[in-house]
Amino acid sequence: MSNANSDLFHSTQLGPFTLQNRIVMAPLTRSRAQSGDIPSELAPLYYAQRASAGLIIAEATQISPQGKGYAFTPGIYDDAQVAGWKKVTAAVHAKGGHIFLQLWHVGRISHPSLQPDGALPVAPSAVQPEGNAFTEDGFQPFVTPRALALEELPGIVEQYRHASLLAIEAGFDGVEIHAANGYLLDQFLRDKTNLRTDNYGGSIENRSRLLLEVVEAVTALVPSDRVGIRLSPVSPANDIADSNPQALFSHVVEQLNRFKLAYLHVVEGATGGPRQVDDGFDLQILRRLFNGTYIANNGYDLALAIKARQDNLADLIAFGRPFIANPDLVERLKTGAPLNALDPDTLYGGDARGYTDYQALNAA
Ligand code: 8OZ
């Protein structure tokens, strides 16, 4: 069977959208935003070059100044950022693509130099992560975050609500709530990072509460078939862990079913690393529990993606790094053409090099 016969390359429905194919461009941090956390002038071109993806999930974007944890990432909390994103969504739509925005609060994965007034990053509990923050002055060790007071949690939910409002104003087709990779919502979920003794800590129900409140607030504004969520149940990314991820994430997914979301997007394995998961954790249980579209991500290549569709292990497949180096990734996979190699030195920061200058086959 030729690649093109795989239904990976056939159009499919996602909520109100007819996607051109089942291939998703995963959210990818590129750290090229302008001052004011405004998307790069080159971002409209970068995303438009990749608009043959069935769905683009634009890079993680901070929902507030407090939600920022890396140098040069874009925001979605003020009008200048909305104006910048409008150019991106218009460019993608002009090419017939669909684009969601990933809503991001990093929690403790930040540094005072990236925070308003040099404040401490916030988190469910004052637990210092191992590792370093990517700041404007290079890598600096993470600090012990400040535990959020109970009274502050409605303000966190409000940040997500406001950001989703602005995302729709900016022309995005929908939003993805980033609850993966050890950022704020994941920090609340896990018992390694959430030591709270109020209604937001302790039991699995309590640790899931903030996430579900965020989903409720976002879906009160954005039709739920335009809202997705990303989870990374077994990833150790950003020093995260839980004593019983299967029970935790089964509960989360069962609760998410109430909202009839557009999709569940799962980082399978260690983010950007091995796909093998801890013994005893079965991600397919989450797929079966979820009543909706399941997007699989992490280390997929063409063969694995075709197999995942044949065996019905996923509805859509998200590719990350291959999309950076191959703006026409869909065409290349469909025809079996070789892929451009990724230049690791231009992943984060910098200019057009390694951003908008990767060639498509027909442009070479
Ligand atoms: C790589 C570098 C910076 C940020 C994530 C948003 O892990 C990220 C990220 C990944 O989800």
Image (tube, helix red, strand yellow):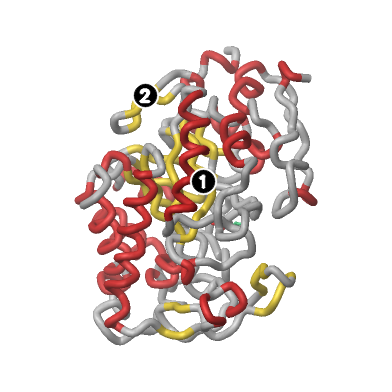
Identity of the residue drawn at 62% across and 79% down:
142
Instruction: Please tell me which residue lies in front, 116 or 284.
Output: 116
Residue 359 location (% of width, % of height): 74, 27
Between the C-alphas of marks 2 and 1, the distance is 26 Å
Three-letter residue code for mark 2: Thr
Tell me which numbered mark, 2 or 1, is placed earlier along the sequence: 2
Element at badge 1?
helix
Identity of the residue drawn at 51% across and 19% down:
6
Q: Does the residue labelled 2 lie within 8 Å of ligand 1?
A: no
Above or below, comparing residue 292 to residue 184 in the picture? above
> Does residue 3 show up?
yes
| Mark linked to residue 84 | 1
Residue 86 location (% of width, % of height): 46, 40
10 Å crowding of disc 1: few (<14), some (14-19), many (20+): many
Q: Quadrant of residue 194?
A: bottom left
Split into quadrants, the picture shows ligand 1 in the one at bottom right
Identity of the residue drawn at 52% across and 44% down:
297
Q: In which quarter of the image is the C terminus?
A: top right
Element at badge 2?
strand
* 25 left or right of 264 in image: right
Three-letter residue code for mark 1: Gly
Instruction: Please tell me which residue lies in front, 107 or 338.
Output: 107
Q: In which quarter of the image is residue 18?
A: top left
Which residue is the site of mark 2?
A: 18
> Does residue 281 show up?
no
Residue 97 location (% of width, % of height): 47, 27
Residue 81 location (% of width, % of height): 48, 52
Q: Which of marks 2 and 1 is in front?
A: 1
* 259 left or right of 235 in image: left
Instruction: Please tell me which residue lies in front, 164 or 13.
Output: 164
